[in-house]
Amino acid sequence: MIKYISVVMIFLFFGSYSNSSFAQKKFEKENCLKQNDVPLNPLNFIDSLSFNDKVKWYLEEGLEKKSIEAKFKRNGKNTS
């Protein structure tokens, strides 16, 4: 029984150690954009969907890229 517990403890110890060494590094930052600052292509696309609700625009910055995100409510649920 003690041998079984020792083996389990060893697996738990090394399992928790290896997970932290292979973890991804993530950086993400969102900044609000005014509708005037949004490029024409995404603005036209969202306008073509004819939402009745207000659309909020965000500039999303990651480690390797930047993107523009539109957030709004549709059928009572938050959508982006």
Image: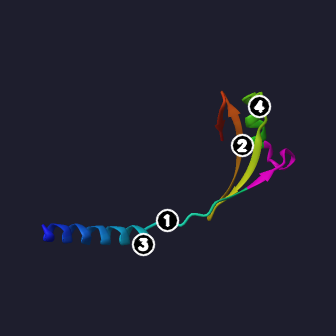
Distance in Å between CA atoms under marks 2 and 1? 26 Å
Distance in Å between CA atoms under marks 1 and 3? 9 Å
Amino acid at pointer 4: Asp
Amino acid at pointer 1: Gln
Distance in Å between CA atoms under marks 4 and 3? 44 Å
Amino acid at pointer 3: Ser
Picture coordinates of residue 53, whole percent (x, y):
77, 31
Choose between 30 and 76: the one closer to the eye: 76
Residue tagged 1: 24
Q: Are marks 4 and 3 in contact (CB under 8 Å)?
A: no
The disc placed on residue 70 is 2
Residue tagged 3: 21
Dot 3 crowding, Cα within 10 Å, few <14, some 14–19, many 20+:
few
Distance in Å between CA atoms under marks 4 and 2? 12 Å
Instruction: Say whether residue 22 is magenta.
Output: no
Amino acid at pointer 2: Ala
Q: Residue at x 14, y 70 (%)?
A: 2
Q: Residue at x 72, y 29 (%)?
A: 49
Q: Residue at x 57, y 63 (%)?
A: 26
The answer to whether residue 65 is left or right of residue 35 is left
Distance in Å between CA atoms under marks 4 and 1? 36 Å
Picture coordinates of residue 78, whole percent (x, y):
65, 37
**What span is in magenta?**
31-40
Q: Counting residues from the N terminus, which is met first, the one under dot 2 or under dot 1?
A: 1
Choose between 54 and 65: the one closer to the eye: 54
Q: Are marks 4 and 1 in contact (CB under 8 Å)?
A: no
Q: Counting residues from the N terminus, which is met first, the one under dot 4 or under dot 2?
A: 4
Picture coordinates of residue 40, whole percent (x, y):
80, 43
The disc placed on residue 53 is 4
Q: Residue at x 46, y 66 (%)?
A: 23
Choose between 76 and 3: the one closer to the eye: 3
